[in-house]
Amino acid sequence: MLLLLLAPIVRAQKTASTQFSGQAAYTLTKQLLDVAPKRFNASPGHAKAEEFLKQHFAPEAAKGNFVTDTFTATTPAGLQTMTNYIVKYPGKKDGIIVLVSHYETNYPLRDINFYGANDGAATSALLIEIGTILRAHPPEGYSIWLVFDDGEEAVKTWSNSDSLYGTRHLAAKWSQDGTLTKIKAILVADMIADKDLNLDYVENSTPWLLDLLKVAAKNTGHSASIFKYREAEEDDHLPFAARGVPVLDLIDAHYGPTTDAMPDGYHHTDKDTIDKISAHSLQISGDIVLEMIRLINQRP
């Protein structure tokens, strides 16, 4: 009887760990940082990051499943052109699960060596690796869309109008064209590769998705890596939450030791480098995301 009870958990662990490679995601993070260490808007690195994404999703583009969403944003630094990329993997059920990560680096930090290894690069790599899996194993359930959004960071100082440019634009666009009504859940990945990983209980996420995150962590053997901290977050999930879409913000906002000099740890400092993240943490995050997809598909 015990073996029968444990079988689903073991199967979930095996499925997640054999499908997602934290090492591959770590390698992709390094590759992105090598070609585009600084990715703030209008920089050469930003253009190289865009090209990096286009190269990886050339097979999807050939099928018409790679969408370029370019728009003009009014920012404190004037009008800026920004681009979201949406990669679509059609499923067999009517509905969409959306995975979101921003790929750019902080514009105000453009004059220091801010590389955003954890803050943008690792999450982009996470989605690319998931895309590699979906390319080989198309979704059996809901369609899955990967969104690499631009302009998550503030251009001057974080506020409701100076932040989340890409997702605010996309939420409004999808509201107008009816896409939002088809979305079953939006999972945002942000800062999920910290060596000392512990995903927060983000209070302004949707409650049933927080419940599902707890189940996903248990099923994949990663319960020790969630819910150490409980707090609300201002992140890419908010524009969709404001329009009634179920959202989950997957984030470890406690990144590195806090000091007087670095009150937010490594966040938005030149210490956010490749040596502060790990393939192991990416494995945990990847396992959990894939299990979340499986669990969402099981809901009535």
Image: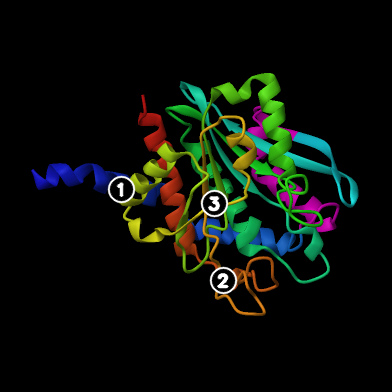
**Mark closer to the chain start, 3 or 2:** 3
- Please name the amino acid that badge 1 sits on: Asn
Quadrant including the N terminus: top left
Do callouts 3 and 2 mark residues in contact (Cβ within 8 Å)? no
Helix, strand or loop for disc 1: helix
| Residue 196 on image: x %, y % | 47, 68
Q: Is residue 263 above or below residue 227?
A: below
Residue lying furthest left in this view? 1
Residue in front for this viewpoint, 125 or 24: 125
Q: Would you say 9 lies left or right of 189 here?
A: left
Residue at image point 53% right, 61% down = 193
Residue numbers of the magenta segment: 39-68
From the viewer's perspective, is residue 186 above or below residue 150? Answer: above
In-front residue for pair 28/9:
9
Determine whether, in the image, residue 209 is placed left or right of residue 45.
left
**Residue under label 3:** 232
**Tag 2: amino acid:** Lys
